[in-house]
Image (cartoon, rainbow, N blue to C red):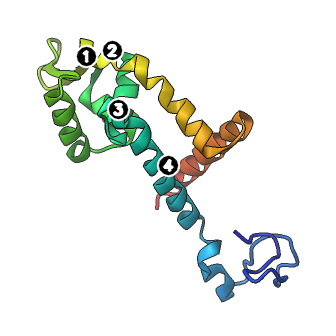
Amino acid sequence: MTWHGENRHGGSDASGGNGPLLDGTDDLLLLDQQICFALNAASRAFGSVYRTALKDLGLTYPQYLVMLVLWEDGELPVKQLGERLRLDSGTLSPLLKRLEAAGLIVRERSPQDERSVLVTPTEAGRALRAPARAVPRHILTAAGLPIEDVRALRELLDRVTANLDASGA
């Protein structure tokens, strides 16, 4: 990206090197100025690396995220699981059906509240945790960043997400 006074051809732009142009010029409409494009490209690249890393576990990336939460929390109502993963029920329900069909989770009505469905990892689901420990190392190695940069990036992305959520857009 060319945020600090350098245009896409390596020359200087009207910002004087103080950051992106904010004067309404078309330079802000250049593809390499779009943070969302950079995030999307990184997300797609991560997706490809995750597909490779998760292949032996028989999980997709969204299924892996479900299992991460269940390994951490043990048992959760579907509603809380969706909130943790930032997924709506229309997206989460098919994921849970596939995980249940694979024998990795069970879904049962809560004895305390019949309206609530609890999701719990099965023994087979819990057993996947041990081989899954290799996945984060694989991803970090592929990303090629020192752990300090990874932590800083995560904090920055969390801040951006919170700001965007708060913007009400």
| Residue 55 image point, x, y percent | 35, 37
Mark closer to the chain start, 4 or 2:
4
User: In the rendered view, would you say 142 is above or below 43?
Assistant: above
Name the kind of residue labelled 3 in the image: Asp
Which residue, as the protein is rendered here, is positioned at the far right?
A: 16
Q: Dot 2: within a 10 Å radius of its alpha carbon, few (fewer than 14), some, or many (20 or more) residues?
A: few
Q: CA distance from mark 1 to mark 2?
A: 5 Å
Amino acid tagged 2: Ala
> According to the image, label 1 marks what residue?
124
Q: Which residue is mark 2?
A: 127
Q: Looking at this view, is 40 or 88 the one in front?
A: 40
N-terminal of the two: label 4 or label 3? 4
Picture quarter containing residue 68? top left
Instruction: Give the amino acid at mark 1.
Output: Ala
**Residue 137 occupies quadrant:** top right
Above or below, 122 relative to 33? above
Contact? badges 4 and 1 (CB < 8 Å)? no
Residue bearing mark 4: 46
Q: CA distance from mark 4 to mark 1?
A: 26 Å
